[in-house]
Each structure stands twice: as structure tokens, then as C-alpha cells.
Image: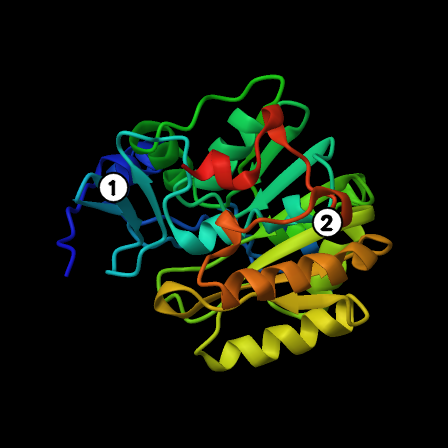
Amino acid sequence: MTKLIKRASAEARAFRHRDADTAATGGKQQVVRSKKRALHDDDLHDAPQIEAPRKPRFAPVTFSEEGGVRFLHFGTEWVQGAMRLRKPDQIELEYAQQMMAWLLFIETPKRVVQLGLGAAALTKFAYRFLKRAKVEAVELNPAVVIAARTMFELPHDDARLTVHETDAWDFVNDSANHGTIGALQVDVYDATARGPVLDSVGFYRAVRACLTDAGVVTVNLFGDHPSFVRNMKRLNEAFDGRVIALPEVHDGNRIAIAFSGPGARRAVHGAASAREADRSGTRLAGAQVDQGSAGIDRPEGRLVRDLML
């Protein structure tokens, strides 16, 4: 079993300002209330008011290393991401490789977005190899963003790379994002790793609304967990049945692929190729797929398989 190496630096740096503000109060966040009590229903300005906003509570960000691979954890032994130290821009975990399966169906779009940054494997890979795309990641926990940059070699934002420190729900429901994303990768888990933290039909409909006419979304699910059936039903409802699921990989991860529209026609060829690859004992990342039928884009003249090596 991988031994956890707990490091408080990332989380401490993320919340240093909070600690400084609360030091004088014994470490407890103070709620400032008015001393007066409203005498009338319309005398709201004298009513008790909470001036300090509520902040989300995050699990600690922890790390471990084994066999030349650095792992990201949220205070438990569940792996939330990984990076091979000698190949920081490659995708180490097999399920994460399958999250790039949208490359089998569409050309590199102008905008590629990840919901849930983790160890930034998908973000770094897309940023390095998909030169024509603007790559974005959405992450709510500031400590995860810091960890990705200090421990997993995520570059800082530039003209092609943006990390949004916000809630994935707010992001997909922002009308400014609707109809603008060609490839959307959803990997939103918390420390319990019991299933996606966002999995309602409303969420998946908002995800679909963000896609272009021929957009594709990949979703990380647990195939051996009750949440898998629930998520597949909701994905099918949100995407009108344009959903396929790849064979599970290590620890039960299964990747669902959903299509916003015309791209679903290409899914027939891609799904058949994925099944053939599984029968031949190879995984999707190394599958031989005909470019003409599956619409593979070849970043820098190479197949996805070549980029994984």
C-alpha cells in the first residue's frame, strides 16, 4: 500500500490570509451582528446580519511517491491524480488516458475544458500537445491549484492556459460558456471518492449546453459503484441517449462519453473501434483506429497512442 506523505504547505499557503485574519480571535471565524433588534418587519437595516461569507470546507491536500510516480490525495489513500516524475507532461493513469478519448471523434477544438483539476495531467497534456486549443481547467479548491503548480509542474496561466478558481456548477451554468466548448472532461470527486459530487440531470444538461454543435464530453465514473448506473441514466437523459461507456480499468474506473449532436454519428465508428481494441487486449490509448472513419486529430502528426509513450 502506498504510504502517504502528508504535506501541509499547499493548504497552508492557500489559506494564509484566512489564518492571519482569524488569529486575533483564537482561530475562530467571527460573525459580526448588529446590537439592535428590528422593531418592525420593514426595519431590515437593524436586523442581525452576517458579514463574514461562508467558505467551503476542503479536505487536506496530501501527496505520496512510489516507483518514480507522485500521487495526489485528499487526506485519504484514494488517488486523485498522478505524475511520473521523469515524464511530467504524459498521462500516467489509464483512466485519465481514456478521458482523452474525445480525440477519436473530433478534431482539436478551439476550446478544451477540464472540470476538476486534480494533478493537472489532462490539462498539461492538452496544453503541450494540442497547440491549436485554448486549454482551461475549473477547480474550486485553491490548495489543489497550488499543489498542481508546485508539485505537478502545471505551468502558470498564459494566452493558451487558464485555471478558473470557481465552482464547476457555476461554470457550466454561466451563459457565457454555452455553445463554446468543443471537448469537456468531467472529473469532480471529493475526498470520499464515492462518486461524482455533481451528477444531477440539471448538471449534465448544463454541461451539454456548454458544448458546440459537435462537442464531446468525457466523464470519470466508478463502474463498480451504485453511482455508475445513476450517472449513466442521467447522462442518457441529458444527452438524448448519445452516450457510450468504455470498459473499466484499474480500481473500477469507467469513462462515459457523451455527444452533443452530429458528433454522435462518428461515435458508432469510435465505439466499434474501442470494442475491437478491448477484444485484442489493448486499451483505448493504444488502439489502432482508422482516421478517416473516427475523425482522429493527430497533434503534431502523431496518434494519441504515440503521445502516451
Q: Residues within 10 Å of mark 2 (few under 14, many from 20)?
A: many
Q: Is residue 185 left or right of residue 216?
A: left
**Which residue extends farthest top?**
159
Tell me the residue that label 1 is attached to.
70
Q: Which residue appears at 34% of the width and 33% of the height?
A: 152
Quadrant containing the N terminus in the rendered view: bottom left
Q: Is residue 278 left or right of residue 12?
A: right
Q: Is residue 224 left or right of residue 45?
A: left
What kind of residue is marked 1?
Arg
Q: Can residue 55 be seen by looking at this rendering?
A: no
Q: Quadrant of residue 108?
A: top right
Quadrant containing the C terminus in the rendered view: top left
Q: CA distance from mark 2 to mark 1?
A: 34 Å
Report the front residue among 298 and 35: 298
Tell me the residue that label 2 is attached to.
294
**Which residue extends farthest front?**
280
Q: Is residue 241 left or right of residue 64?
A: right
Report the front residue among 16 and 268: 268
Using the image, determine if residue 258 lies above or below residue 27. Answer: below
Using the image, determine if residue 34 lies above or below residue 181. Answer: below
Provide the secondary structure element on which disc 1 rests: strand
Residue 219 location (% of width, % of height): 58, 59
Provide the secondary structure element on which disc 2 rests: helix
- Who comes first in sequence, dot 2 or dot 1? 1
Q: Residues within 10 Å of mark 1 (few under 14, many from 20)?
A: some
The way the protein has been coloured in the rendering is: rainbow
Q: Can residue 68 be seen by looking at this rendering?
A: yes
Q: Quadrant of residue 21?
A: top left
Disc ID at residue 51: none
